[in-house]
Amino acid sequence: MLRFVGQAAERGLQAGIFVVFVVGLRQRNPGAVVNAACALLVTHLSPCIERRYDIEFKEWQRLYVNTGMLAHAVGMLGPYDDVWWWDNVTHTSSATLLGGVVFAAARRRGRDPYPRVIAVVVCLGVLWEAFEYAIHAIAKYIGVEPILVSYGRADVAFDLGFDLVGALLVLVFGDHLLGNLTTTNEKIQRV
């Protein structure tokens, strides 16, 4: 029963992302369309990852990913501009997702995840901010609506700060919350 409820919630979140996609099309909002399309793609990666790496996500983990993707997509319809804390929440969420992947991969390989999580989240955070700035600058130069918006240096500093918060959350709670993703079948059979 609980699995059915989780699957229904997962489909509901995916439907919400699809609604953002449709609203983005109707409003001619390329940022919402592209972000919703990417978010939908990410929400469908879980089964592929499970098959490829012989793991099984818990329902809450799937819902966490889908909720983060919905928040990003909805943000492009206005909350990034209108709700002062929206960007902070989505950066923290993204950093926990990225940090969680790095944490699980490092643990599965028997390596210390702590420096890896920080390094990957910070480095990709910096690259993302550069990418965001470049997309915005190019769009402005050629006179089209940007699919990503850069709000200046202070915003970049806050974004990177919240990326770091997400990475630290993974380091604090990773062993407890990601244990199902960090153990290989070989390790389970030995126990």
Image: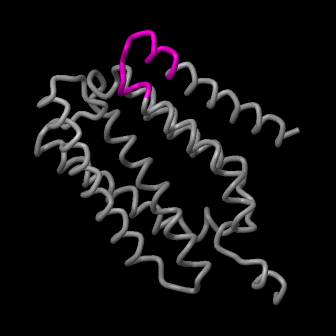
Q: Is residue 18 left or right of residue 123?
A: right
In the picture as drawn, the residue positioned furthest to the right comes out as 1
Q: Magenta stretch: residue 27 in it?
A: yes
In the picture as drawn, the residue positioned furthest to the top comes out as 26
Residue found at x 56% / y 73%: 105
State the image coordinates of residue 53 (x, y, percent, origin top left): 69, 68
- Main secondary-structure element of the magenta-colored stretch: helix
State the image coordinates of residue 122 (x, y, percent, origin top left): 30, 63
Asked if 73 appears above or below 53 in the picture, the reply is above
Q: Is residue 164 left or right of residue 71?
A: left
The magenta segment is 21-33
Most foreground residue, 139 or 17: 139
State the image coordinates of residue 95 (x, y, percent, origin top left): 41, 54
Q: Quadrant of the N terminus?
A: top right
Q: Is residue 18 left or right of residue 76?
A: right
Q: Magenta stretch: residue 167 in it?
A: no
The figure's colour scheme reads one colour
Image quarter for residue 104? bottom right
Asked if 166 appears above or below 115 in the picture, the reply is above
Residue found at x 36% / y 24%: 30
State the image coordinates of residue 168 (x, y, percent, origin top left): 39, 64
Residue found at x 12% / y 44%: 154
